């Protein structure tokens, strides 16, 4: 991917070529604050929910599941049925998985009950009852959770980067391997490029708001970084530090080495192609052994048990 500025997430890296539409309500009669001299609109930053904004700006679950589904079929000659979404948050991706086929079922794992409750109310509740019964959420540490053997386990949006030392990341990877079926595959993503080591902000215009990726601090000695997501609205209001990330910038060689040390039989990097007209990522990820040294890129990794 060739960009002058960088922030992670499927939208930033053009993981999906599809247009994503955000339907944001304008302040209505109920969205006013009392004040002397008449009512005034409530700031848009107080109307909108940070989890909803994240799903609109960052996630592209349709494209993500397209990739996982088709790649697993290519590797194994059949479609997967079971998926575990580690660090599931609102379980948006797990919901997309169970929508795909009536044979699909999913488990979402996250340590934060608040975000899972939000997902139950806003994502799972929208599923038809027969689809909703095929998804389960567990509030647990992903390094200790126990589930039935899974065809697929995913750790997306760089969530596993919160494990900042090799020993802990290796423990997590070994636990994932133990949770896979005999022909299971672990899918994860990573980003890099020389912009990711900078203290920078990148602004992306969404429908009705601006998504700001803020790389606030980076330590080149241990590759630990602090990042924020902010949202800005047309009325000038902002939702600052809606999300904070304290994690390590892991490189692809490090990740693959630790996966290998954790017992995975084979790892493959899927590199994003480039749209020749725009110089941006084209949303198509193919297995590669060489990539361009761009300022920013995103890749998938498939680790076969």
Image: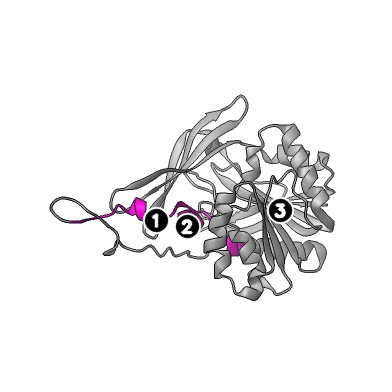
Q: Residue 187 bears which disc, if any?
A: 3
Q: Residue 303 bears which disc, if any?
A: none
Q: Nearer the viewer, residue 207 or 129?
A: 129
Does the rendering let one see residue 275?
Answer: no
Residue at image point 76% right, 67% down:
81
Location of residue 198 in the rendering, given as x and y in whole percent from the top left corner: 50, 33
The stretch in magenta equals 39-63
Q: For marks 2 and 3, give the one nearer the viewer.
A: 2
Location of residue 167 in the rendering, given as x and y in whole percent from the top left corner: 75, 33
Q: For marks 3 and 1, give the one nearer the viewer.
A: 1
Residue topped by disc 2:
52
Judge the density around disc 1: few (<14), some (14-19), many (≥20) Cα neighbours within 10 Å: some
24 left or right, relative to 52:
left
Residue topped by disc 1:
48
Question: Magenta includes 173?
Answer: no
Q: Which is nearer the N-term, disc 3 or disc 1?
A: 1
Cα distance, mark 1 to mark 2?
8 Å
Residue at image point 66% right, 43% down:
160
| Figure check: 255 above or below 189 | above
Secondary structure under the numbered disc 3 in the rendered image: strand
């Amino acid at each position: 991917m060739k960009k002058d500025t960088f922030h992670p997430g499927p939208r930033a890296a053009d993981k999906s070529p599809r247009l994503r539409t955000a339907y944001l309500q304008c302040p209505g009669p109920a969205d006013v604050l009392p004040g002397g001299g008449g009512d005034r609109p409530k700031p848009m930053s107080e109307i909108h929910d940070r989890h909803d904004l994240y799903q609109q700006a960052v996630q592209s679950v349709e494209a993500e599941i397209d990739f996982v589904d088709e790649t697993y079929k290519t590797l194994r000659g059949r479609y997967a049925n079971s998926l575990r979404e580690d660090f599931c948050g609102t379980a948006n991706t797990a919901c997309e998985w169970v929508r795909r086929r009536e044979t699909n079922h999913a488990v979402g794992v996250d340590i934060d009950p608040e975000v899972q409750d939000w997902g139950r109310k806003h994502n799972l509740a929208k599923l038809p009852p027969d689809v909703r019964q095929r998804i389960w959420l567990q509030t647990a540490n992903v390094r200790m959770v126990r589930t039935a053997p899974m065809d697929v386990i995913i750790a997306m949006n760089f969530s596993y980067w919160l494990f900042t030392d090799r020993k802990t990341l290796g423990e997590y990877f070994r636990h994932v391997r133990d949770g896979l079926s005999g022909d299971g595959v672990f899918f994860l993503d990573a980003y890099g490029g020389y912009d990711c080591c900078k203290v920078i902000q990148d602004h992306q215009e969404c429908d009705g708001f601006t998504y700001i990726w803020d790389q606030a601090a980076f330590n080149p000695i241990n590759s630990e970084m602090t990042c924020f997501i902010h949202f800005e609205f047309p009325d000038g209001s902002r939702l600052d530090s809606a999300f904070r990330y304290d994690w390590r910038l892991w490189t692809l060689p490090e990740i693959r080495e630790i996966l290998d040390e954790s017992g995975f039989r084979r790892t493959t990097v899927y590199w994003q192609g480039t749209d020749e007209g725009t110089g941006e990522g084209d949303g198509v990820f193919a297995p590669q052994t060489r990539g361009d040294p761009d300022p920013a890129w995103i890749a998938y990794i498939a680790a076969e048990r």
